[in-house]
Amino acid sequence: MVKLFVNVDHIATVREARQGKKPSPFEAAKLALLAGADGITMHLREDRRHVQDHDLREFAARGEAPLNFELAAVDEILDLCCELRPPLATLVPERREEVTTEGGLDLVGHSDRIQAATQRLQAAGIAVSLFIDPTPQSVEKSHDLGADIVELHTGSYTDAPDEESRAKRLAAICEAAALTVQAKLVLNAGHGLDTTSVGKVAALPQLADLNIGHAIVSRALMVGMAEAVREMRQAIDAAQG
Ligand code: PXP
């Protein structure tokens, strides 16, 4: 069965808007796991715009469910990942000015850095996933660099402007997925998926994990809004007797 890893970064985005304690990514992770998630994903960015080091430390220390630690191949964050030793780490590209992870890793331009990071994480007992664009070249290069897993970036599929390009982009994902399995790499996928787009990706043969965040957090805000307002109304009414 395909595993669902819920990315709780954007719970921390809301918390960081006030730089306080709520909402807690850790509490959100617990709820996600109770509701059927198989694991939790967090992306510790260099600019710490959402999750913070203590979020990863807290989740890893409890060890209640698998953690997928997403990171760029930079020493400071590799140090923390090797210290926490999650079962899985996903190397992603990172540009400070980007809104989200906009594309897959540049495995040619940064091959030495990615290979060194992969080896370092593997030496710490961590399985390494490379977040790549769904192309045959990227799959082949991931294999050459010694990855255990590839995560195919599904963002171009979910962002497709029309049905024709959507079908073409899905076909590219299917081809890259088949090559991944042929290369004996574990197959993961994610980015931009929601309940309307997840089906075709979830149906890929031998898909292991899906990483999904923004759509779940967005929906959680909407389905939780009515209850949150009712609670506040009751608190106000109770004070007025
Ligand atoms: N996979 C990777 C490697 C990501 O960087 C992200 C976003 O942080 C996701 C999956 C989840 O994407 P989304 O939040 O759009 O579901």
Image (cartoon, helix red, strand yellow):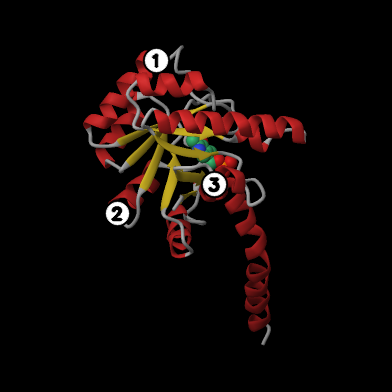
Against 241, residue 142 (above or below) is above
Residues at marks 1 and 2, CA–CA distance in whole angstroms: 32 Å
**Quadrant in the rendering for residue 122:** top left
For label 1, the crowd category at 10 Å Cα-Cα, with few meaning under 14, some 14 to 19 and many 20 or more, is some
Looking at the image, residue 105 sits to the left or right of residue 117; the answer is: right
Marks 1/2 in contact by CB < 8 Å: the verdict is no
Against 114, residue 58 (above or below) is below
The mark lying in front, picked from 1 and 2, is 1
Residues at marks 3 and 2, CA–CA distance in whole angstroms: 27 Å
Q: Secondary structure at mark 1?
A: helix
**Quadrant in the rendering for residue 162:** top right
Residues at marks 1 and 3, CA–CA distance in whole angstroms: 29 Å
Q: Secondary structure at mark 2?
A: loop
Please identify the residue farthest to the top as the structure is shown.
109
Mark positioned earlier in the residue sequence (3 or 2): 2
Which residue occupies 30% across, 43% down? 87
For label 3, the crowd category at 10 Å Cα-Cα, with few meaning under 14, some 14 to 19 and many 20 or more, is many
- Residue nearest the viewer, comparing 29 with 144: 144
The residue pinned by badge 1 equals 111
Q: Secondary structure at mark 3?
A: helix
The mark lying in front, picked from 1 and 3, is 3
- Mark 1: amino acid: Ser
Q: Position of residue 194 (x, y in %)?
A: 63, 48
- Mark 2: amino acid: Gly
One can see residue 130 in this view: no
Label 1 CB-ligand 1 distance < 8 A: no
Q: Which mark is residue 63?
A: 2
Which residue occupies 68% across, 81% down? 237
Against 156, residue 12 (above or below) is below
Q: Position of residue 153 (x, y in %)?
A: 54, 32
Q: Which mark is residue 202?
A: 3
Q: Position of residue 6 (x, y in %)?
A: 48, 50
